[in-house]
Amino acid sequence: MDWREFLSSIISNNTERDRIASDIGVHSITLVRWASGESTPRPHNMRQLLRALPKQQRNQLQQLLEKVSSDISELEIDTSEQDIPHKFIMEVLEARASIPDLLRFWSITRLVLQQALKQLDPERIGMAITVVRCMPLRDGKIRSLRESVGLGSPPWGGDLEEKALLLGAESLAGHVTVSCRLEQIGDLRTNKTFLPAYQVEHEVSAVACPIMYACRVAGCLLLSSTQVDYFVPEARLLLIRGYAHLVSLAFTPNEFYNPEDIALHIMPPPQRQQEHFDGFRRRVLQRMQSSSDSERRISSTEAEQQEWQKIEATLLHLLPEEPPA
């Protein structure tokens, strides 16, 4: 018996086939094609397959794979990666206890996103992770969200903060922040979920998880992948929930809002927003320099927030684009 025949025997049980497919984030028919020889799984897919199998079946499949290739070291898996390392959790708690308020948000979010990217995309097949946070109240309501600290693996750039935009009711992040419920879209190219979303460059699947504290919400953790159904496996979603909880430690209690205080507008698409962000850093520096002549100097964080609010006010009053004739 070769490894394909062994896989075929496992997935002959429809329930088990569907479970494995769900765990590794592929369609059931893909497993059938692997078993029949119609297609061959990539190394990261094979690792996911091994991880999804019970220990006895996993060991047997590895033995059969060794008959095909004497070197299967690249297929070795570490089942401990299914949990957030305890050592890292303690590192985040230590950072929260020791970092000054002014540096807390940036330091903790960067720390968490670096670890999340490493664990959720170990093969570096393409992932972006962004902390999306509520803008301050405007007329007593939250009208939009802003993309904040973000990191990515190729094809996304390493630091995504410079590409940050405002999001509203038209976005997956907006929907999740309002509903306070994790949602994922397996294929944005077809999006049969009826969830609001728009597709950015390189993005195929996406998930957003609310950032919560005491039944209030500060925004969400937004993830994108270059792969179809990458966020389907329940184990992966549990990790994302865990990282969202850790990100919540970067916020102060007054940055969390009651869901009824959130009334998001529909924000313009990225291409219409971009012109308003051109020269953003220059304007922030100008604000800081202007404040140096006054009695109270403002920090870079305060200057950025003021500039974000100015852009938000402008975008909220933009007329919607006319539909094409």
Image (spheres, rainbow, N blue to C red):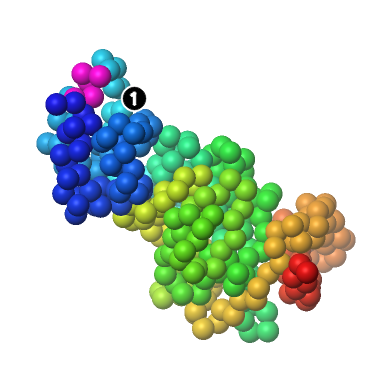
- Note whether 176 is above or below 275 in the view shown: below
Q: Amino acid at mark 1?
A: Glu
The residue lying toward the viewer, choosing from 15 and 210, is: 15
The relative height of residue 193 versus residue 87 in the rendered view (above or below) is below
Q: Residue at x 28, y 42 (%)?
A: 32
> Left or right of 135: which side holds 256?
left
- From the image, which quarter does the N terminus lie in? top left
Residue 282: image location, x then y, percent: 82, 52
Residue 65 is one of the magenta-drawn residues: yes
- Residue segment shown in magenta: 64-68
- Please give left or right for residue 278 compared with residue 127 in the image: right
x and y, in percent, of residue 34 in the image: 30, 36
Splitting the image into 4 quarters, where does residue 120 fall?
A: top left
Q: How many numbered discs sit on the rendered protein?
A: 1
- Look at the image and say whether residue 250 sits in the magenta stretch: no
Name the residue carrying label 1: 74
Report the residue that reaches farthest toward the top: 70
* Mark 1, secondary structure of its residue: helix
Q: Nearer the viewer, residue 68 or 62?
A: 68
Residue lying at the far left of the rendered structure:
56
Q: Residue 113, how many percent across, how many down?
A: 49, 48
Q: Is residue 260 left or right of residue 36?
A: right
- Residue 203 lies, in percent from the top left, at 55, 49
